[in-house]
Image (tube, grey):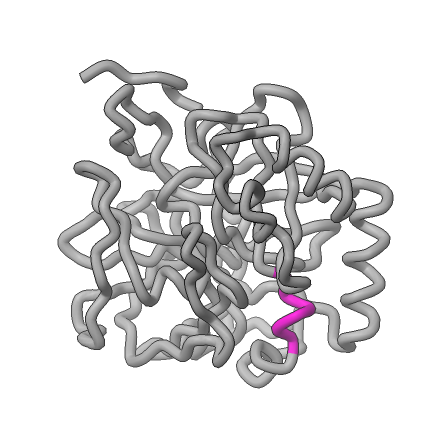
Amino acid sequence: MSQVNDDRIIGGRYARKGEFPYVVSISHRPLASSCSGGILSPWYVMTACHCTSVVIDPFGGLLNQVTGDYSNTRVIAGTLARDFPHDQGYQLRWVFRWIQHPKCEPRLTGEWIFDVAIIQVTARFFFNELVRPLTILPRLFSLKHFVKISQVVQRTCIITGWGFTAVTEEKQYVNASRYLKALATRLLPPFHCNKLLCEYSRFDGCLNDLALESPDRMCAVAQHPNAGTICSGDSGSPLVCGGVAVGLVSYSSSCNHVNDPVVYARIDKSYDFISKYYIHSPDYVDE
């Protein structure tokens, strides 16, 4: 079983302790980290809707249905380690329930629309320098304007995750990152994004004119060519631009192709749904 693109979030760099205190690892036991997410408030985490519906089987890349039994799903905050945190300050919580966006659904071509879900944990998170909520602009108009400007100027953003770091020639995902990785990306204007997506015949969604037909999505590429991309296990990770959360990892054409755009669910298009669970207090600290 040979590997391609060895050690490429695929690529990126390892995060520093406390650098991304809003990021959580979400795992459906007995698998390793299945998705990532971002903290909204002491009781709620935001992730991709498909993370609460299907889970990637790394031994063949199959999609398995997630059942309504939350007892085997856990959320870990405040750590760089993926599944067995050994550093001080981590907080492990179990899932009480998840709430999917009412418009979330898969398309025949594989992508999801309104790919946003909320996870409620069984015990609250306590905020400190290692565990803190995301920053989301308090007004929808401000967030929409921020996203539009970020696309025009192709603002540099950060994506993080514990996803797989290699893909075999048999198209199996392998080598889930043991520690949190980060990748600098830049947002693209919609027309530029569509142009890039349509250059790749392997991207079925674009060929069927569905890639960005819904306004709830946007895309970004790595800041530098061949720098890296997201892979299975990074889904649901928040895209943060200038300290503000603007999207969630939804899907990409393939982990093998590091220069392809990655598609994100736009937070501003699900603002009414998300804001019910968000705490607009960036200085909120328990300890």
**Front residue of this view, candidates 215 and 206:** 206
Residue at 24% over, 24% down: 170
The answer to whether 13 is drawn above or below residue 94 in the figure is above
Residue drawn at x 48%, y 41% is 204
Q: Residue furthest left?
A: 30
Q: Is residue 133 left or right of residue 43?
A: right
Q: Position of residue 173 (x, y in %)?
A: 28, 33
Residue that lies at the very extreme toward the top in this rendered image: 2
Q: Quadrant of residue 2?
A: top left
* 152 in the magenta segment: no
Q: Quadrant of the N terminus?
A: top left
Residue at 57 percent of width and 71 percent of height = 285
Out of 39 and 164, give the one closest to the viewer: 164
Magenta span includes 269: yes
Q: Which residues are magenta?
A: 266-271
Q: Is residue 61 left or right of residue 226?
A: left
Query: Looking at the picture, does residue 184 appear above or below residue 287?
Result: above
Q: Nearer the viewer, residue 80 or 33?
A: 33
- Report x, y in % for residue 179: 37, 37
Q: Residue at the location (19% across, 50% down)?
A: 31
**x then y, percent, for residue 90:** 35, 57
Residue 19 shows in the view? no
Image coords of residue 133 (percent x, y): 56, 66
Q: Quadrant of the rendered structure where residue 37 is?
A: bottom left
Q: Residue furthest bottom?
A: 276
